[in-house]
Image: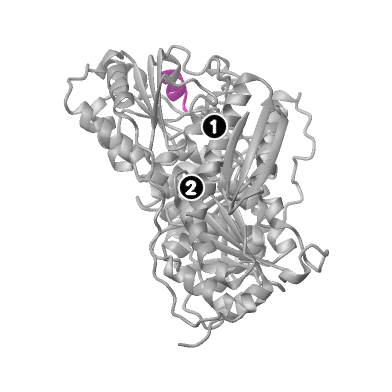
Amino acid sequence: MRTVTAYDGRLLARIIHLAHRFGCTYTRAASERTGVAYRMEFAFAGPSDALRRLDAQITKLLDDDKETME
Amino acid sequence: MHTRTGAAIVLDTLESLGVETVFGYPGGAIMPLYDALYDHRLAHVLVRHEAAAVFAASGYARSTGRPGVCVATSGPGATNLITGIVDAMMDNVPVVALTGQVRTTVMGTDAFQEVDVAALTHQVTKRNIVVRSIEELEPALHAAFRLATGSRPGPVLVDLPTDVLRAPEAEPRGAGNESLTSRERPHATAEALDAAVAALLRAKRPVLIAGGGARWSGATEIFRSLAARIGAPVVATLHGLGCPDPDDPAFLGMLGMHGWKRANHAVAKADVIFALGMRFDDRVTGDPAKFARNAHTVVHADIDAAEFDKIVHAHVKLHGDLRETLVALDHRLARVTLPSFARWRESASEPHERLPRDEARDEHLSATDVLDALFAALPGDAIVTTDVGQHQMWAAQRVRASHPNHFLTSGGLGSMGFGLPAAIGAQVAHPGRTVVAIVGDGGFQMSLAELATLRRHDLPVKIVLLDNRNLGMVRQWQELFYNARYSATALPDNPEFTTIARAYGIESRLVDHAGAVPDAIARMLEAPGPLLLHCACYPHENVWPIIPSGKSVDDLMEPVPA
């Protein structure tokens, strides 16, 4: 399970699309508005290498998300 | 201070961000912006298709290192941008796309020319922003530019509803003049830098690979200085061309599927690889399991941590801006005594290697002869763009770019129709320079209408059309890998390109035999305006060598002697 904070609520959809592109599936995806941001929870299943690459891409998306809002 | 509209705020903000020119095509929802452009200082280049607007913005960005801006209306205007946006994403090009949108009150009602371009481009931009009010305009544009240029560059789309563009600002004020500031960039750690130095001290056969990161980080100078200090063989990816000095005997040429044999063999034999600002594209690695298979250490430097271990495992990860990383590495190397790699460099250099080629038959012109003559005649600061296909690879094998910004090509996405509009963008950015678009007959016909853009803006782009009356690269693969079943690749009905060019008011010449090439190229380069050089080439010339997709250098193919 990975819990993240994002300003762009659409990232939930982007991350799910990315997971499927990498041959993974999501076993949990939840998002809750908390003030100006969103608290999102994800869990994925898939090949370990794909999960590792997915995790790295999520980190990058969140970095860009943070930069957009700063 | 007069009250500005949202459209005027957009233009003033672009200007404050250093934008001088935008490339675009008008339409309904974006009309308020075009109305404001009518008497604004910002220059506008009218293209003839939105796809050309984004490719031109990309050419501008690739040739300057600064963001390129394109504009399109809602609906089909916006969707026509998407290929170029993906292209910019794949090649890390800072493009800011501005799209008109139906007014906010009808968004979601299937209004005329409404499309949810934000949803469509969500996966293929670094970020997109739908502006919902006039107050959001300036912050959105600042964020777009910051994001497009920051970290690993890429495209950002800003969607502009027409009512936001028409709205008056509540409190009149002048345009801001803010500079772009990005979040603090990562820096390679001291431990990783020490490990890189240690790998080099242990190395017997190191190779440096220059990638496209060199362009965007401005690392060319430090790369060359570092390469000279190390004295190892140097190769480049397609986007790394121009980073190594083409006159450096240690430079072995392009790596990969159509790279030089010596470059691919050097990487295969290397015991230490320095992969500098590259992403191990499949056109570079072939079979990743066999790529650099003798390397006990791969040192990978990149701004994007997601690239580490994506394709090839890196033993040492230098996470940071490439230029800063190489400067730090250079400082460390200045304090140690490196082993000499002269013997390895000489054995890898194969100075007498020539690119294998088919011989043109029946007195036909060879496309590679044309390119050899062209590159011999071009001034050192010329900017060359290509389209996609055989001519692109022939050019990449031969180009002697003295800087990465001098060779612009669609690498990751491989978008046909890129070459001419990218040249337009480069020529707008560099009005005094020689800009040459090398195109094939397939891709050129995807961008023909941009001849009108050349004429309208009097841009002296030189077009070298290598016409083999085929979709040559696909034809070549059909010949080699599909039992010569030539499905939908012959173009025997090509038009008279010289006549078409003249119809657009563009000077044109036809060359169909080798003897006429040098003079035709010299006259083309002397021409003050745009010119199309139509080269009627031998139709079955292939690109050699070729490493078949997913294979290794062991499977490298060369032409069979007649």
Q: CA distance from mark 1 to mark 2?
A: 17 Å
Three-letter amino acid code at disc 1?
Ala
The quarter of the image holding the N terminus of chain B is: bottom left
The quarter of the image holding the C terminus of chain B is: top right
Side of B507 where B382 appears, left or right: left
Residue under label 2: B153
Q: Chain of mark 1?
A: A
Contact, mark 1 vs mark 2 (Cβ under 8 Å): no
Q: Is residue B224 above or below residue B128?
A: above
x and y, in percent, of residue B119 in the image: 71, 52
Which residue is located at x 73 percent, y 57 percent?
Answer: B116
Side of B194 where B242 appears, left or right: right
Q: Which residues are magenta?
A: B260-266
Q: Residues within 10 Å of mark 1 (few under 14, many from 20)?
A: some
Three-letter amino acid code at disc 2?
Pro
Quadrant in the picture for residue B132: bottom right
Which residue is located at x 48 percent, y 28 percent?
Answer: B308
Q: Nearer the viewer, mark 1 or mark 2?
A: 1
Considering the whole magenta stretch, tell me its main secondary structure: helix
Q: Nearer the viewer, residue B99 or B64?
A: B99
Q: Is residue B20 above or below residue B444?
A: below
Residue under label 1: A56
Number of numbered discs overlaid on the protein picture: 2
Name the mark on residue B108.
none
